[in-house]
Amino acid sequence: MKQTASIISTYTADVSGAASALFELGGMTVIHDASGCNSTYNTHDEPRWYNHDSLVFISALSEMDAMMGSDDKLINDIIETAQELHPKFIAIAGTPIPMMIGTDLNAIAKIAEDSTGIPSFGINTNSMHSYVSGVSKAFLALAKRFVKTDIKRQKGSGRVNIIGLTPLDYSINDSDESIRRWLLDNGMQAASSWAMGSTLSEIEEAGNADVSLVVSYDGLAAAKYLYDTCNIPYVIGSPLGHAFSHALMQALKDASLSDACSVPYLNQSTDNAHIVLIGESVYCSSLASSIAQEYGMPCRIICPVETEQKLLNKEDVIAIDEDDITPHLSSADIIIADPLYKPICPPGSRFYSLPSESFSGRIYRQDIPNLIDRNLKKEDKKL
């Protein structure tokens, strides 16, 4: 029962993360699951659903299909729909039942591609992991399938691939536009934006960028692929807060003139830190760096979703389950997290709300701040 969340919510599942990553790119995403399960995605996980067209379908997997397999039905439905709608690609994402019955999503995708001529691929999600895993797999699949690797990197051009940008971390509060504007204000420009405010053709040309900016952990796998195949170095961090945005921009400019990758928020002192941030590792670590510089108050990170320990500072922890998170909050004076974490925070702590679309969905959407290159003291007088 350790993995049961009895008080707090759970994070968006990997299958929704995959759909979110591909939402704006003109493809067709098929979630292989029971009829009605797509309502979880479009109601709680996808804030763009009502103002942006996208081909996201459910396969309407039935009990009989699950028992007998019935892959032919899924394949025929995909082919018929694709021939009618002409998507730029077809992505097939899995859920628990396909995982348990051993559905080969990549094989189905190959049959669909052979029949339609439309690039197709499977994404091995299973709803047992967080959105971070699903976004990461989707972006890596995009990179492998579409990025032209014969393009020469434009070293020193200041062209930046922004990778890891989805509303599950950045909502629809113009954070994506703010990142692109921040680049322009500092003499750089977005070559591609994975995957808010960008097109598939821009992602195809990502190999002629100069450097990649990984703004959440789910963009790292694709950034590593571009580094290995196109020699494009990457910098990990997000320009949250005015202080850290300066350090991040310098790291980007250094990387654009070299082949070196970097994580500029690392090696920060977290000794005696009584501020705790809960959330995705790159987002929270970047914000913690600005808080430490602007307020002189070190912060610790609790990351409840997939990441790597080497991307966190010394006192930061990865704690996935509710029972693991709670003990790390006991000594915190200030806790910054999604409001749905408040019930497990110690009574004597001060709680500051930082809603996340991936945790509380649409409940606090209007309260999600755009902190890109902002002066934090002006944003929150109370801290």
Image (cartoon, rainbow, N blue to C red):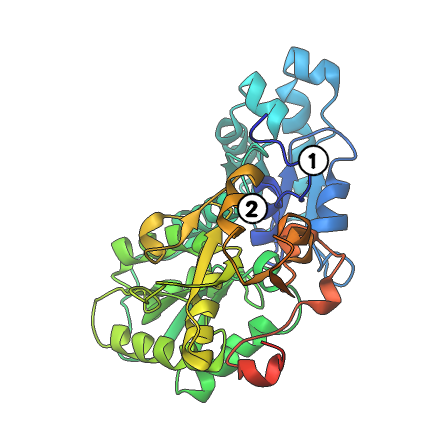
Q: Relative to residue 234, is residue 62 depicted above or below?
A: above
* Residue found at x 32% / y 80%: 250
Residue type at numbered disc 2 = Tyr
Q: Quadrant of the C terminus?
A: bottom right
- Where is residue 207? Give x, y as percent: 34, 63
At 65% from the left edge and 34% from the top edge, which residue is drawn? Answer: 78
Q: Quadrant of residue 93?
A: top right
Q: Amino acid at mark 1?
A: Glu
Q: For residue 119, say whether it is visible.
A: no
Given residues 182 and 34, the one toward you in this image is: 182
Residue most extreme to the top: 68
Q: CA distance from mark 2 to mark 1?
A: 29 Å
Are the two marked residues, 2 and 1, in contact with CB atoms closer than 8 angstroms?
Answer: no
The picture places residue 217, in percent across and down from the top left corner, at 44, 54
Classify residue 297 as left or right of residue 258: right
For the question of whether residue 9 can be seen, the reply is yes
Front-most of residues 296 and 354: 296
Please tell me in which quadrant of the rendered image residue 205 appears.
bottom left
- Measuring from the top left, give residue 38's x and y in whole percent: 73, 40
* Residue drawn at 55 percent across, 37 percent down: 323
10 Å neighbourhood of mark 2: few (<14), some, or many (≥20)?
Answer: many
Foreground tag (2 vs 1): 2
Q: Which residue is mark 2?
A: 131
Secondary element at image label 1: helix
Q: Position of residue 175 (x, y in %)?
A: 58, 72
What residue would you read off at disc 1?
80
Outermost residue, front direction? 348
Q: Residue at x 66, y 11 (%)?
A: 68
